[in-house]
Image (spheres, coloured by chain):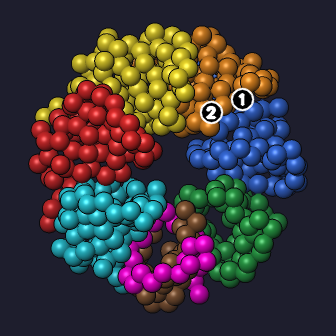
Chain colours: A yellow, B red, C cyan, D brown, E green, F blue, G orange
Amino acid sequence: MAMPLNILEKSVSKRVSVMLKDGRSLEGKLAGFDEYMNMVLEETEETKEQQTRRLGTVILRGNNLVAIVPK
Amino acid sequence: MAMPLNILEKSVSKRVSVMLKDGRSLEGKLAGFDEYMNMVLEETEETKEQQTRRLGTVILRGNNLVAIVPK
Amino acid sequence: MAMPLNILEKSVSKRVSVMLKDGRSLEGKLAGFDEYMNMVLEETEETKEQQTRRLGTVILRGNNLVAIVPK
Amino acid sequence: MAMPLNILEKSVSKRVSVMLKDGRSLEGKLAGFDEYMNMVLEETEETKEQQTRRLGTVILRGNNLVAIVPK
Amino acid sequence: MAMPLNILEKSVSKRVSVMLKDGRSLEGKLAGFDEYMNMVLEETEETKEQQTRRLGTVILRGNNLVAIVPK
Amino acid sequence: MAMPLNILEKSVSKRVSVMLKDGRSLEGKLAGFDEYMNMVLEETEETKEQQTRRLGTVILRGNNLVAIVPK
Amino acid sequence: MAMPLNILEKSVSKRVSVMLKDGRSLEGKLAGFDEYMNMVLEETEETKEQQTRRLGTVILRGNNLVAIVPK
């Protein structure tokens, strides 16, 4: 069985798309995460209502994540 | 009595539809899950307001799920 | 005193209506539940804004339930 | 000092009105409750936007309650 | 330093106004409370959009309170 | 490193502005707080949509606070 | 692997932008944080709907943060 945290670990150093609770979506290179699914993304871009913004490194709170999509 | 996590376990490798809190719906092959109902879906498609988007592998946070419907 | 989980246990194999936080309502045969009130419904029908949809077996997250009404 | 759970215990077998987080209001005979304030109401009536609906026995999740008003 | 629960204890038998998360406001005599800030109010009046309703005794869930204002 | 609870402790007896989740803002003298960031404000004024209301002593639930701004 | 709290620690004394759940955004010098990601920002500016407000020192509750962006 594919465990969620294992799949996440395999995605480290790769690009992932992250859907947030408020409808925003971030895409970046997954640099790391902890047991609460707090994450570090690098070279991150935020997309909201078809507008894109470069954010660089971002620390994300795990409790605001809806889904993580490895690219 | 049919325990929720047992029914979920029987659905591994099968297609499930997942209803999220924000009204979105995802359908994919259930690759695995953990005790918090965090899940891994494969060959996932997102449906929102009658539009479909292919997402491939998706890691879902359990606390945003409303219901899981085995297909 | 009628304990909530006992009343729920007496409803196993019977039809129940479940009110969800987002206003949706599901009706199905209660196949089982766990300590978090996660539930398994069978032969489930979803009602939303007077439209009905057949869902079959559904696993429900307990933290999204508002009320359970045994039929 | 009047402890909340003691006052609730004194209301068992009596009619109470329950205000839910989503604005709905239920009135019924309090048949029992547990430590999480999950409750069992009997002969329950739901009131929403001045419409009343008879529900019979209802199991309520404690985390969706705002207030309980013994009648 | 004035600890919140101590100030609350000093308000027992006195009138308090309670602001709820949903914008409602209740005023009543604080009859008691527990460690979760669940409360019992007596001779309670609810105010919502400038309308007042007499509720008598009310048991309030602590997790829906925003603020308590001793009168 | 400036720890949040230490900064809060240094603000005791001084005026602070508190932003609540629902957009309301309270300003008062911080009389005390506990480990959950429940707080006691004195000589409190509430500001909402440019209207100000004097509230006197207020007990605030920590889980509804967004930010505290020492004046 | 870059752990979220380590990245945060490296940002102490540097400017960070913080996205809150309610859409507000704060920018300030990160003075410190604790295990719950409660934070202290100094020389803080709040941006909301293209308006900026100087707040000075701000204590932020960790459970209302969506993302932290080191500048």
- Structural crowding at the residue carrying mark 2, measured as other residues with C-alpha within 10 Å and reported as few (<14), some (14–19) or many (≥20): few
| Pointer 2 chain | G
The amino acid type found where label 1 is placed reads Lys
The answer to whether residue D32 is visible is no
Q: Is residue E15 left or right of residue D27?
A: right
Q: Count every numbered label the image shows and give the total.
A: 2
Q: Range of the magenta residues?
A: D47-71
**To which residue does mark 1 refer?**
G48
State the predominant SS element of the stretch in magenta: strand
Q: Earlier in the sequence, mark 1 or mark 2?
A: 2
Q: Position of residue D55 (x, y in %)?
A: 42, 81
Mark 1–mark 2 Cα distance, whole angstroms, equals 8 Å
Which quadrant of the structure image shows residue E67?
Answer: bottom right
Question: Is residue A65 at all visible to an observer of this figure?
Answer: yes
Residue D52 lies in magenta, yes or no? yes
**Mark 1 touches mark 2? (CB < 8 Å):** yes
